[in-house]
Image (cartoon, rainbow, N blue to C red):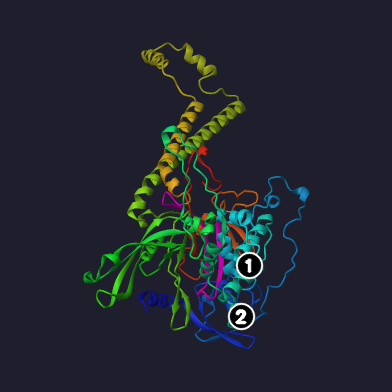
């Protein structure tokens, strides 16, 4: 067992108690984390018995376990038997009196969120399918994926075999027309047909087993990479000025045919490869100098759809885990040495995708219990990720100047916003002063009797000096607020144009890549529980990331997030995302979806719907 496994097992032993769950004549061994509330224990029971948490009755020493019960207060002992009552299946429907007074359509105004339907719809849990629901909600935050499926995907009418793309199109189409919870039954059936792993039954034989959301994400993305093609319509960059050179269309890696793809299909492009696939240069060098050859040490190119964040006792931050995942020791046969030798595999990113998927490697195989266990270690992650240091020297040399220019433009935008806020505060204070003066009948400073007294006051030597300076100041021309605003706006547009000219060669080379090395967090898939085969999955999606593919409207971006817990959707603040770093069986980040920081280009330079935000 590795040191990481020993560390995780030792930490878990401090707070877990092995007990026996009894339900309908069957026994289940389970480790209860007494540091977590009763809600976590209920989800463990649900994963084993199929009894929904809302339908469970658990009595321990005469006390019923509730969601807020502190498990540490129950005095659990090893091998203690716990009886669980309740029937497997959907939670019972509860009829309760309405908590709020009924409201009718006539009562809503045009700004009412309930009428506008700002809250996106959830997905119904069909029995341990939270792993799928969370994955689909996070994928939905990729507007190009939704747009391609709903508006541009043309399935092969002659192909009657089930395809994920066809049924995912139906899911997203229905979700774009209604905010009610949707039942993804046909998509689920197709997923289980294409991959029988997702059709495994639970150990009790009642219902389907819980699955790993990361495995579902990987399978779906890989399937869409091979099946979701749309017509390729390369768009030229805006017409160049005479001194800007010629205008060319962008080329991307999806122009490289898939394995087994015919040349005729080159007019179509893979959406997943275009927006989510990156490239790395891989070098494999023998650790023994006498075993090295130039042929073996030559870098090779590979494509990736996600980056792993490895977790060990020394990993505390996402950056550390990503760097650890780019270097690996492997054993392979050396032709030169005539025996097995240790090699160091090093990866450097040579193309950054527009959307970067990061997988926290939190699950590992625990041999003593013969199942996947969860690494509870806390690993923080940023809302804005700079990944340029993990790129090849050639790519980094292109990214850094663009990144710095983007930051310069941001500073100018922030300065304009600060100036506007200060001006609003000043005007507000002036209005309040005028209102107070009018209310109490006092004249503003510099007017009325005090002003008259100042006029009759004999002029002193200081007054004469001030008068002289005042006469000199008459030659100074003061700018109005409008003039200052116009100058700042012109300076900002100039900076944006300079950014465009700087990034233009990269856009001509590959329009759909990330050209700054900067990413902003858009979605998080989380896991709650102790193992991959149990627990509960949910998704957090940043507001403003979900775009309706039929209307083009996106949810308002105000810094908050949508929390998708199956068919329950809740709005939460950004501080909730910072709590997903792990450290226990509570919600821990498993998949991070980052989107490229938008290029703040002049409006005349934007040629695509999702080119910038």
State the residue position of label 1: 187
| Label 2: how many Cα within 10 Å (few below 14, some 14–19, many 20+) | many
> In the shown orientation, is residue 1 left or right of residue 224?
left
User: Mark 1 or mark 2, which is nearer to you?
Assistant: 1
The label on residue 49 is 2
On-image quarter of the N terminus: bottom left
The residue closer to the viewer here, 213 or 350, is 350
- Kindly tell me whether residue 503 is visible in this rendering: no
Spatial separation of the CA atoms under disc 1 and disc 2: 25 Å
Position in image of residue 318 (x %, y %): 41, 61
Residue under the image location 71 percent in, 51 percent down: 115
Q: Of label 1 and label 2, which has the lower sequence position?
A: 2
Tell me, for residue 493, which label it has, or none.
none
Please, what secondary structure does the residue beneath circle 1 have?
helix
Task: Single out the residue that lies furthest toward the left.
Answer: 290
Residue at x 60% of width, y 29% of height? 435
Q: Secondary structure at mark 2?
A: helix
Q: Quadrant of residue 448?
A: top right
Q: Nearer the viewer, residue 429 or 370?
A: 370
- Image marks 1 and 2: residues in contact by CB distance under 8 Å: no
Question: In this picture, which residue range is highlighted in magenta?
Answer: 513-541
Q: Can you tell which quarter of the image residue 85 is in?
A: bottom right
């Amino acid at each position: 067992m590795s040191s990481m496994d020993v560390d995780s097992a030792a930490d878990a032993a401090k707070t877990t108690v092995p007990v026996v769950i009894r339900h309908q004549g069957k026994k289940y061994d389970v480790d209860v984390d007494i540091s977590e509330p009763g809600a976590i224990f209920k989800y463990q029971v649900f994963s084993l018995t199929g009894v929904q948490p809302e339908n469970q009755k658990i009595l321990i020493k005469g006390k019923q376990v509730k969601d807020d019960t502190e498990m540490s207060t129950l005095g659990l002992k090893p091998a203690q038997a716990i009886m669980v009552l309740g029937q497997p299946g959907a939670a019972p429907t509860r009829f309760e009196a309405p908590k709020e007074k009924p409201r009718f359509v006539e009562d809503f105004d045009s700004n009412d969120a309930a009428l506008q339907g700002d809250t996106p719809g959830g997905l119904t849990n069909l029995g341990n399918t939270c792993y799928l629901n969370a994955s689909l909600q996070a994928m939905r935050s990729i507007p190009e994926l939704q747009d391609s499926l709903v508006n541009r995907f043309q399935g092969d009418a002659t192909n009657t075999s089930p395809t994920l793309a066809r049924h995912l199109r139906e899911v997203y189409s229905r979700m774009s027309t209604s905010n009610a919870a949707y039942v993804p039954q046909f998509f689920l059936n197709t997923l289980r047909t294409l991959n029988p792993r997702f059709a495994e039954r639970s150990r009790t034989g009642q219902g389907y087993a819980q699955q790993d959301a990361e495995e579902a994400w990987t399978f779906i993305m890989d399937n869409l990479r091979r099946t979701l093609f749309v017509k390729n319509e390369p768009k030229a960059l805006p017409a160049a000025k005479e001194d800007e050179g010629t205008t060319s269309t962008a080329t991307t890696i999806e122009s490289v045919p898939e394995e087994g793809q015919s040349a005729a299909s080159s007019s179509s492009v893979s959406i997943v490869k275009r927006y989510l696939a990156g490239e790395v240069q891989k070098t494999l060098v023998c650790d023994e100098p006498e075993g090295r050859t130039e042929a073996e040490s030559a870098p090779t190119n590979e494509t990736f759809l996600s980056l792993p964040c490895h977790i060990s006792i020394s990993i505390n931050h996402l950056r550390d885990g990503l760097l650890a995942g780019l270097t690996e020791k492997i054993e392979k046969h050396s032709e030169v040495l005539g025996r097995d030798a240790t090699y160091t595999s090093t990866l450097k990113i040579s193309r950054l995708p527009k959307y970067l998927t990061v997988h926290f490697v939190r699950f590992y195989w625990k041999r003593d219990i013969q199942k996947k266990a969860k690494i509870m270690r806390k690993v923080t992650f940023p809302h804005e990720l700079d990944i340029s240091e993990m790129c090849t020297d050639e790519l980094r040399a292109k990214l850094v100047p663009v990144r710095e220019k983007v930051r310069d433009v941001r500073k100018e935008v922030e300065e304009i916003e600060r100036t506007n806020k200060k001006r609003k505060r000043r005007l507000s204070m002036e209005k309040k002063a005028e209102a107070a003066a009018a209310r109490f009948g006092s004249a503003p400073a510099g007017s009325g009797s005090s002003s008259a007294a100042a006029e009759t006051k004999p002029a002193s030597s200081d007054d004469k000096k001030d008068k002289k300076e005042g006469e000199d100041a008459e030659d100074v021309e003061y700018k109005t607020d409008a003039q200052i605003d116009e100058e700042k706006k012109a300076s900002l547009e100039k900076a944006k144009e300079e950014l465009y000219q700087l990034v233009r060669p990269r856009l001509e080379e590959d329009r759909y890549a990330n050209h700054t090395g900067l990413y902003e967090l858009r979605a998080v898939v989380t896991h709650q529980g102790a193992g991959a085969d149990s627990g509960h999955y949910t998704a957090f999606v940043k507001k403003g990331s979900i775009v309706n593919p039929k209307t083009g409207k996106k949810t308002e971006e105000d810094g908050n997030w949508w929390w998708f817990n199956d068919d329950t959707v809740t709005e939460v603040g950004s501080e909730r995302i910072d709590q997903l770093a792990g450290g226990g069986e509570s919600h821990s980040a498993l998949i991070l979806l980052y989107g490229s920081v938008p290029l703040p280009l002049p409006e005349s330079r934007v040629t695509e719907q999702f080119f910038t935000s």
